[in-house]
Amino acid sequence: MAKASARHILVATKEACEALKTKIEAGEDFAASARENSQCPSGKDGGNLGEFSPGQMVKEFDDVVFSGEVGKVLGPVKTQFGYHLIEVTKRSE
């Protein structure tokens, strides 16, 4: 079964998400940005969500994690929780 490891940053607005993505793409550290900005408890751990399988996260999140490019900052991804930036750190089939 497929598995992935990812980290994310959760914010309330698409604009905030896009602004963070721009900063990270310009060299800001993803984990530091997650600790400062994420509204998810995982932010304290740099946004790290650990390893999970398809179906363990909400569909919009899963779709990106299991199809997006590994190592690239993906998003904004809208879910019922808000807007996410997602970085897939590892994925296996």
Image (cartoon, rainbow, N blue to C red):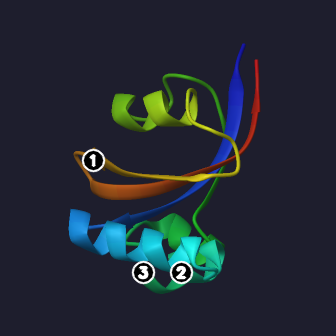
Q: Residue at x 37, y 28 (%)?
A: 59
Q: Nearer the viewer, residue 70 or 58?
A: 70
On screen, residue 13 versus residue 3, left or right, reads: left
Residue 86 in view of the camera = yes
**Vertical relation: 55 (above or below) 72:** above
Image spot of residue 22 (x, y percent): 45, 73
Q: Please give the residue where the numbered disc 3 appears in the rendered image.
A: 37
Mark closer to the chain start, 3 or 1: 3
Q: Is mark 1 on a helix, strand or loop?
A: strand
The kind of residue tagged 3 is Asn
Q: Do the residues labelled 3 and 2 touch (CB within 8 Å)?
A: yes
- Give me the disc on residue 33: 2
Work out which quarter of the rendered image holds the N terminus and state it. Answer: top right
**Vertical relation: 58 (above or below) 16:** above
On screen, residue 25 versus residue 50, left or right, reads: left
Give the distance between the C-alpha atoms of the residues marked 3 and 2, in whole angstroms: 6 Å
Q: How many marks?
A: 3
- Give me the disc on residue 86: none
Q: How crowded is mark 1: few (under 14 residues within 10 Å), some or many (20 or more)?
A: some
The kind of residue tagged 2 is Ser
- Give me the disc on residue 78: 1
**Vertical relation: 6 (above or below) 67:** below
Q: In which quarter of the image is residue 32?
A: bottom right
Q: What element carries label 3?
A: helix
Image spot of residue 64 (x, y percent): 48, 35
On screen, residue 50 versus residue 24, left or right, reads: right
The kind of residue tagged 1 is Lys
